[in-house]
């Protein structure tokens, strides 16, 4: 017997059927009782003139099995639910359509948008990148820099292949964010952490978190220090780790809005602007190769100023160059610094790497610069690898690139080199040394022969 209810109105007709069936089976001596209850509900909605029929069938099955003869018998309960939907369109079409896989609820639609990268706008992507930098990468870098003054030791904190990719991606030109965005994100993270620690739900675990974990948060006061240490670690040149700056230094709002981490790095490696009366025009000069400088008696020495500049001391016949740090990120850092200077009139970093390309004509030149300390690399890196990197970086440079302060020093070095090479004894130094050695040996032999004849 199945009761039926019919509702009629001005709109579509609705029919609801409800049927229930209960079956009980009892066993014999084994005392097994099985109870099965099945309920079915069927709803049919029929539209008006559009002839749309929708059928929804829901079935639930519940089974209870009791085993055992006494009170200790085990009980098992199993519930199965199934749902089936069929949609038919058209007055005479009974063929079901394929169930739609598109999200139906607002929550499902929002989740679909979150996992679809194409739907993200630029602001949302920048926010996610900013959170990653402020919460993940920069605190890890600051902890590593705080423990050591050796960049090689700090590199060990990022020795995995994934961390290598992260370190190099952070400095790429296309991934840069304004410093103001990073500072805003850091302040928002700080407020969120404070609110979480004060919440009632977090009270139970707050003590254990505070006791066992310390989260490094970037604040307005520490932001400048973070930028300085970032530039020191990413610089292509070796220098002493910067000293801690005075706390509470005001931050330039315009600078924060316009500059990025790559801009700050570029500013940290270029020389100071020339004096107002310095000559700003001239022509580029070519630096002699390292072995040519050695032949003319000009010594190449390393400096740790951390800036793309050269200094020539004529009275000492020496030229000082910044120590270039060969590590896993050097190629990426150099290429992006060159890209940063692409549209600028003055290109100090580009001119420096072009000058290095002139110094290193072959592997022999790379060995000379490495012995002089101008190229710093690990023991496992050979001169051929360094030579290949210098040539690869030069392939990304734009010609002609001029930086007059550097070109004037190169011109001075070149003139001094040519003057010394014009000297007969300097120009023919290998032959002179050989002839002098032969003459000295001959004199010693003659004296010894006379003593023997004595």
Image (spheres, rainbow, N blue to C red):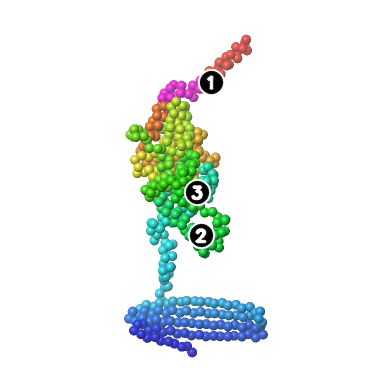
Residue 141 tag number: 3
Region of the chain picked out in magenta, as a range: 419-435
CA gap between label 2 and label 3 equals: 25 Å
* Residue 420 location, quadrant: top left
In the current view of this chain or complex, which residue is farthest to the bottom? Answer: 1
Quarter of the C terminus within the rendering: top right
Q: Mark 1 points at which residue?
A: 437
Q: In this view, does 449 lie to the left or right of 424?
A: right
* Residue 85 location, quadrant: bottom left
Q: Which residue is drawn at 43% across and 52% down?
A: 183
Q: Is residue 65 above or below residue 264?
A: below
Q: Mark 2 points at which residue?
A: 197
Residue 192 pos. (x, y %): 47, 58
In front of the other: 178 or 251: 251
Q: How many marks?
A: 3
Lower position in the chain sequence, tag 1 or tag 2:
2
Q: Which of marks 1 and 2 is in front?
A: 2
Lower position in the chain sequence, tag 2 or tag 3:
3
In the current view of this chain or complex, which residue is farthest to the front? Answer: 248
> Callout 2: 10 Å neighbours few (<14), some, many (20+)?
some
> Callout 1: 10 Å neighbours few (<14), some, many (20+)?
few
Q: In this view, does 148 lie to the left or right of 102?
A: right
């Amino acid at each position: 017997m199945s009761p039926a209810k019919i509702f009629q109105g001005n709109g579509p007709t609705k029919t609801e059927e409800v049927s229930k069936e209960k079956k009980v089976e009892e066993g014999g001596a084994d005392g097994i009782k099985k109870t099965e209850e099945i309920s079915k509900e069927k709803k049919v909605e029929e539209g008006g003139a559009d002839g749309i029929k929708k059928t929804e069938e829901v079935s639930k099955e519940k089974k209870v099995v009791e085993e055992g003869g006494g009170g200790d018998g085990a009980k098992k309960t199993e519930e199965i639910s199934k749902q089936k939907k069929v949609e038919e369109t058209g007055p005479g079409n009974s063929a079901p359509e394929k169930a739609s896989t598109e999200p139906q609820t607002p929550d499902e639609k929002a989740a679909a948008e979150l996992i679809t990268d194409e739907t993200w706008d630029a602001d949302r992507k920048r926010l996610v990148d900013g959170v990653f930098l402020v919460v993940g990468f920069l605190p890890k870098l600051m902890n590593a820099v705080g423990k050591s003054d050796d960049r090689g030791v700090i590199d060990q904190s990022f020795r995995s292949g994934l961390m290598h990719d992260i370190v190099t991606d952070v400095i790429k030109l296309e991934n840069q964010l304004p410093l103001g965005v990073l500072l805003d994100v850091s302040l928002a993270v700080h407020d969120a952490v404070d609110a979480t620690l004060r919440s009632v739900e977090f009270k139970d675990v707050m003590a254990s978190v505070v006791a066992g974990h310390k989260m490094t948060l970037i604040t307005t006061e520490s932001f400048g220090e973070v930028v300085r240490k970032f530039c020191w670690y990413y610089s292509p040149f070796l220098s002493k780790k910067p000293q801690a700056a005075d706390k509470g230094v005001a931050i330039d709002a315009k600078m924060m809005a316009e500059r990025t981490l790559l801009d700050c790095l570029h500013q940290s490696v270029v020389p100071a602007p020339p004096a107002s009366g310095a000559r700003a025009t001239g022509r580029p000069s070519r630096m002699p190769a390292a072995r040519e400088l050695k032949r003319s008696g000009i010594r190449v020495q390393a400096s740790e100023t951390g800036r793309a500049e050269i200094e020539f001391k004529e009275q000492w016949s020496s030229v000082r160059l910044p120590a270039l740090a060969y590590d896993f990120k050097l190629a990426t850092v150099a290429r992006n610094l060159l890209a940063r200077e692409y549209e600028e009139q003055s290109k100090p970093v580009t001119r420096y790497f072009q000058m290095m390309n002139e110094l290193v004509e072959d592997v022999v030149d790379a060995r000379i610069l490495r012995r002089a300390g101008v190229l710093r690399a690990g023991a496992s890196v050979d001169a051929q690898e360094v030579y290949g990197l210098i040539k690869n970086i030069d392939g990304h440079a734009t010609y002609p690139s001029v930086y007059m302060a550097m070109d004037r020093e190169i011109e001075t070095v070149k003139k001094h080199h040519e003057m010394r090479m014009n000297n007969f004894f300097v120009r023919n130094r290998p032959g002179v040394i050989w002839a002098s050695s032969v003459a000295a040996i001959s004199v010693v032999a003659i004296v010894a022969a006379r003593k023997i004849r004595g």
